[in-house]
Image (cartoon, rainbow, N blue to C red):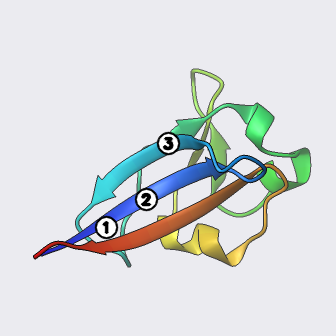
Amino acid sequence: MEIYVFTVRNLETNELIYAEGTESGSEYCSSFAIDGKWLTDEEKARNGWYKNYKGLYGYDEEVRHLNNYSYQFIRFAVEKLEYH
């Protein structure tokens, strides 16, 4: 059985900020939202980021695209875990 986990981690400490199980590793859009302190102004201006009504930042494209960018404070991953 395969399970995919979308994670957001602190780049310096590897502390888990957010995690969410997914059904797919490729075409998955998440409704996660993070505090703006984790993104620089330049990073917030990149494709797909938006500020929601609570003042948090979400991403409106497939989360696998987050792996294509480097971020100053956080890292994103979609990890495939196999259970037998």
Q: Is residue 52 above or below residue 31?
A: above
Residue at x-position 61% and y-position 67%: 66
Gap in Å between the C-alphas at discs 1 and 3? 14 Å
Residue drawn at x 38%, y 79% as measured from the top left: 26
Residue 45 in percent (x, y) is at 81, 54
Q: Nearer the viewer, residue 72 or 45?
A: 72
Q: Which image quarter holds the N terminus?
A: bottom left
How crowded pointer 1 is (Cα within 10 Å; few <14, some 14-19, many 20+) is rated as some
Question: How far apart, in angstroms, are the residues tagged by discs 2 and 1?
Answer: 7 Å
Q: Which of marks 3 and 2 precedes in the sequence?
A: 2
Write the residue at 16% across / 72% down: 83
Q: Secondary structure at mark 1?
A: strand
Q: Position of residue 53 (x, y in %)?
A: 57, 24
| Dots 2, 1 in contact, CB < 8 A | yes
Q: Quadrant of residue 68?
A: bottom right
- Residue type at tag 3: Tyr
The residue indicated by pointer 3 is 18
Residue 65 visible to the viewer? yes
Q: Nearer the viewer, residue 31 or 72?
A: 72
Residue 76, quarter of picture: bottom right
Residue at image mark 2:
6
Cβ atoms at labels 2 and 3 below 8 Å apart: yes
The kind of secondary structure element at disc 2 is strand
> Where the C terminus falls, by quadrant?
bottom left
